[in-house]
Image (cartoon, grey):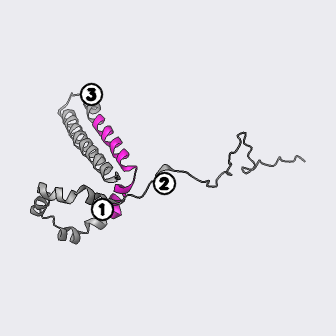
Amino acid sequence: MATQKPLPSAAKTVSSRKNSTVFPLGEQGPRNSPLATSPPIKLLTRVEQLKLLSKAEKAGLLSAAEKFGLSLSTIEKLGLLSKAEELGVLSAATDPGTPGALLSLSLGLLLLGPFCVYLVPEDYPWQVALQVVVALVSVVGGSASFAASNFVSNLQKSN
């Protein structure tokens, strides 16, 4: 009868490097993440430091929002803050990866418009309309994403 060789165990790994630690396959090892060592972001403290509410008041944004029917009581009745929390908007503002992701999104959108105009032919009116719509969406979305990236980055900065 033929005998089978025992399978090498993942725990019996040989390392040629000195002072190295080997973790068996499937087991979590210690992870050193630079994001884990950074202090937590205090969003409301940063809003207060930047005096964002005072600037919004001076710019007339609060009265303009009230004219459109958006007051604090309306926000409370509609449950907009809890919906924003469910969607992860508030936690994304404190995530250190959010500004970079928004910047990447803005660059992608800003490149999408010219590529669409270049690649889509102009043989039919619907193709021209498609070019216009994609270009507008990419410019507006890319600009908004770039502004949001800058805003979130400023909120996350610590003094």
Q: Which SS type dominates the magenta stretch?
A: helix
- Under mark 3, the amino acid is Tyr
- Kind of residue at disc 1: Leu
Q: Are marks 2 and 1 in contact (CB under 8 Å)?
A: no
Q: Residue at x 12, y 54 (%)?
A: 59
* Residue 137, placed above or below residue 35: above
Determine the CA span between mark 2 and mark 1: 21 Å
Q: How many marks?
A: 3
Secondary structure under tag 3 reads helix
Identify the amino acid type marked 2: Thr
x then y, percent, for residue 129: 18, 36
Residue holding disc 2:
37
SS at badge 2? helix
Please rate how many residues cluster around mark 1, counting C-alpha atoms within 10 Å: few if below 14, some from 14 to 19, many from 20: few
Seen as rendered, the residue at the extreme right is 1
The residue at 9%/62% (across/down) is 67
Stretch in magenta: 84-111
* Residue placed furthest toward the front: 159
The quarter of the picture where residue 61 lies is: bottom left
The label number, if any, that marks residue 118 in the structure image: 3
In the displayed structure image, the side of residue 21 where residue 80 appears, left or right = left
The numbered mark, 2 or 3, whose residue comes first in the sequence reads 2
- What mark, if any, has residue 44 been given in the picture? 1
Q: Quadrant of residue 140?
A: top left
Name the front one of labels 1 and 3.
Answer: 1
| In magenta segment, residue 72 | no
User: Sequence order check: which comes first, mark 1 or mark 3?
Assistant: 1
**Callout 1 secondary element:** helix
Task: Point out residue 95 in the picture as x, y percentages from the top left corner.
Answer: 39, 54
* 89 inside magenta stretch: yes
